[in-house]
Image (cartoon, rainbow, N blue to C red):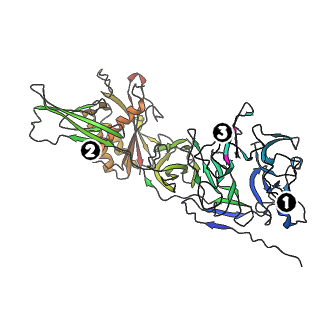
């Protein structure tokens, strides 16, 4: 009677317990079922893997323990079915264990594991007297040749599971050579002048007293590996790490669908971590599984909260005739304000000591000892998207997540959604929009807390995209030009900021006419700053602006401040200080902060240039009126 072996192939869906996205996982069809298949790698449209399956149709499964591992190659017949595996590179195949293997990007150089003594035949495949070493081979005229041992290997120790970085500048491998943390440790060598430097241990943040092996490096620089020493679901689990500023971050365990209570190892993935393969013995033999990442999702993120470091200061003491004294406030940043009630905008988070002196106008002497006010400011704890709020079609816009402030949260993954679903990216990305409109840009962060638990954070930001920077410019490109300064060279004294206006978005004709009327009477004025803040001469135009926006309920304004002359202090810092002055003025007028955005950009990317460089304008304030 013939024995029939029925193998059930299945698809598994899991909701992972770590907060990551769903994976679809299934065993590949070329698993033999009774033999072992593991360590897949991509090669020329197919997969090379290790297996102890026999290449004979007369399989004696009772003799499996005597069979060594060979490298096999398999390709797909079509989009769904795999062909039959064939022995890979027969010209380098030996009678001992061959594999796992890794290839360079061009596919003409491979590094692979092999027992050092090819003449020693095994009575038992588990015999450990013949250690594994690393070897390389070249593809010459379609034939693998020039098999060469790795220069640093020692026949007394194991050197195995090699993995080349995508650019070929590093080779990672596992070894129990002396000087490690115990068991098998991960090492790498740098390629310099077509030769390998000495092995470097990845250190105790990666290597443990257990075994770390089966490394793989994707194109983003993430190093995946298997370990039974970091704790997990059981057996070997797959982790990844990343080298940041020369240090390896704490390994992050993959989802429970990839990792199981059994041994999970030998993972490879495409550059986006959307598709890949890994090995597992969860079905009693080592099998290869494919995985596909279902598009990542994040909870609906909050909108960004812009930090406000502007405050009003006043003396609480009573009984002092303010008409007879001078209040002098020193904020410790070069700015001194005079008055019983003053406002000040600090440059950012930190601890500040504000000093108050009260001087008698007649005697010119201080009538009160110095009073100190301690002010502690911190950034809002949030994910943060640093970018312009507007742009034009087909022009790249930089988006930066570097200012995210999340305590006890180590960021490991950046995901960006520009209206077409979340995609994995980096801290800084550029994106261009192909159509005019309003977009909701979303930043998703995946990371771990202080206990190593994985979680997600997200935030959203509205971006307005227009056909041109000045879609509907005011007639004659009307400018409000600054007057010449009064010769005072103090940092903020008599800063003359040109005003340029653009009407952006689908504003109605009535709204455009209202905006033109608003600025008609201010053609020969500028918004001026001095070391006390906004000059009173600029109050009328700002009040008119507030009145206009309050009246037009569906119009908002973005004010971009650009300094056009180089400054000792730094143009970005100065423009941001001017932006804070304007922001404070509006807040003090109880102007709805959802109706305006004010930001300093230094000398970067102004939409307009000064009309006449001979006027020696200090900068430009671009007023962009936008349909909400």
Q: Quadrant of residue 588?
A: top left
In the rendered image, residue 172 lying in the magenta stretch gets the answer: yes
Q: Earlier in the sequence, mark 3 or mark 2?
A: 3
**Is 282 in front, or is 8?**
282
Where residue 470 sits: x, y (%)?
47, 40
Q: Nearer the viewer, mark 2 or mark 1?
A: 1
For marks 3 and 2, give the CA distance.
60 Å
The tag earlier along the polypeptide, 3 or 1, is: 1
The spot of residue 87 in percent (x, y) is 86, 54
Total residue callouts: 3
Determine whether, in the image, residue 30 is placed left or right of residue 495.
Answer: right
Which dot, 3 or 1, sits closer to the camera? 1
Over which residues does the magenta segment extend? 167-185
Q: CA distance from mark 2 to mark 1?
A: 84 Å
Seen from the viewer's position, the closer of residues 10 and 113 is 113
Q: Is label 2 in a helix, a strand or a loop?
A: helix
Give the residue number, with chain letter if any, for mark 2. Answer: 588
Depicted 612 relative to depicted 502: above or below = above
In front of the other: label 3 or label 2?
Answer: 3
Q: Return the residue at label 3.
A: 200
- Earlier in the chain: of badge 2 and badge 1, it is 1
Specify the quadrant that holds the N terminus.
bottom right
- Secondary structure of the residue carrying tag 1 is helix
Residue holding disc 1: 66
Camera sees residue 110 = no
Mark 3 lies on a secondary structure that is: strand
Q: Main secondary structure of the magenta part?
A: loop
Q: Does the magenta run of residues contain 392?
A: no
396 sits left or right of 336 in the view: right
């Amino acid at each position: 009677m013939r024995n029939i072996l029925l193998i059930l192939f299945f698809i598994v869906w899991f909701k992972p317990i770590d907060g990551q996205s769903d994976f679809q996982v299934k065993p590949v069809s070329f698993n033999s079922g009774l033999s072992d298949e593991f360590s897949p790698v991509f090669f020329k449209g197919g997969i090379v893997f290790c297996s102890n399956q026999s290449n004979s149709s007369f399989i004696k499964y009772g003799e499996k323990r005597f069979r060594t591992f060979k490298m096999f190659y398999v390709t797909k017949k079509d989009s769904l079915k795999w062909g039959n595996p064939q022995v890979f590179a027969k010209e380098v195949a030996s009678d001992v264990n061959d594999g796992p293997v890794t290839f360079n990007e061009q596919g003409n150089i491979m590094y692979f594991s092999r027992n050092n003594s090819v003449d020693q035949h095994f009575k038992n495949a588990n015999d450990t007297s013949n250690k594994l070493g690393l070897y390389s081979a070249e593809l010459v005229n379609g034939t693998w040749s020039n098999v060469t041992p790795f220069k640093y290997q020692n026949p007394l120790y194991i050197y195995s599971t090699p993995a080349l970085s995508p650019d070929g500048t590093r080779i990672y491998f596992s070894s129990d050579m002396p000087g490690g943390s115990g068991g098998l440790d991960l090492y790498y060598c740098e390629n310099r002048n077509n030769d390998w430097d000495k092995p470097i241990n990845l250190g105790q943040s990666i290597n443990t007293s257990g075994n770390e092996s089966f490394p793989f490096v994707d194109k983003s620089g993430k190093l995946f590996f298997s370990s039974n020493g970091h704790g997990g679901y059981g057996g070997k689990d797959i982790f990844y790490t990343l080298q940041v500023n020369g240090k390896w971050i704490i390994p992050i365990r993959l989802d429970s669908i990839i990792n199981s209570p059994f041994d999970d190892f030998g993972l490879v993935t495409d550059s986006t971590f959307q598709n890949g393969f890994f090995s597992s013995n969860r079905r009693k033999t080592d099998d290869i599984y494919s995985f596909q990442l279902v598009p990542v999702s994040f909870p609906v993120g909050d909108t960004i909260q812009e930090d406000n470091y502007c405050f009003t200061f006043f003396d609480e003491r009573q009984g002092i005739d303010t008409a007879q004294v001078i209040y002098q406030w020193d904020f410790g940043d070069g700015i001194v304000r005079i008055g019983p009630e003053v406002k000040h905008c600090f440059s950012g988070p930190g601890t500040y000591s504000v000093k108050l002196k009260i001087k008698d106008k007649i005697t010119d002497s201080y009538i009160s000892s110095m009073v100190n006010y301690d002010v502690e400011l911190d950034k809002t704890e949030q994910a943060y998207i640093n970018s312009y709020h507007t742009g034009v079609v087909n022009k790249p816009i930089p988006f930066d997540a570097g200012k995210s402030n999340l305590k006890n949260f180590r960021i490991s993954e950046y995901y960006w959604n520009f209206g077409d679903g979340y995609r994995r990216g980096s801290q800084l990305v550029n994106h261009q929009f192909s159509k005019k409109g309003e977009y909701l840009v979303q930043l998703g962060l995946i990371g771990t807390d202080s206990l190593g638990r994985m979680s997600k954070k997200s935030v959203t930001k509205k971006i307005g995209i227009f056909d041109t920077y000045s879609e509907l410019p005011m007639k004659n490109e009307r400018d409000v030009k600054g007057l010449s300064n009064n010769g005072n060279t103090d940092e903020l004294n008599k800063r003359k900021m040109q005003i340029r206006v653009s009407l952006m978005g689908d504003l109605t004709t009535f709204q455009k006419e209202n905006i033109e009327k608003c600025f008609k009477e201010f053609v020969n004025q500028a918004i001026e700053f001095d070391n006390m803040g906004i000059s009173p001469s600029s109050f009328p135009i700002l009040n008119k602006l507030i009145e206009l926006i309050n009246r037009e309920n569906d119009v908002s304004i973005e004010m971009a401040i650009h300094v056009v002359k180089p400054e000792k202090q730094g143009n970005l810092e100065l423009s941001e200080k001017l932006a804070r002055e304007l922001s404070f003025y509006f807040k003090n007028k109880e102007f709805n902060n959802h109706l305006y955005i004010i930001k300093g950009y230094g000398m970067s990317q102004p939409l307009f240039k000064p009309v006449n460089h001979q006027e020696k304008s200090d900068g430009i304030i671009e007023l962009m009126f936008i349909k909400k």
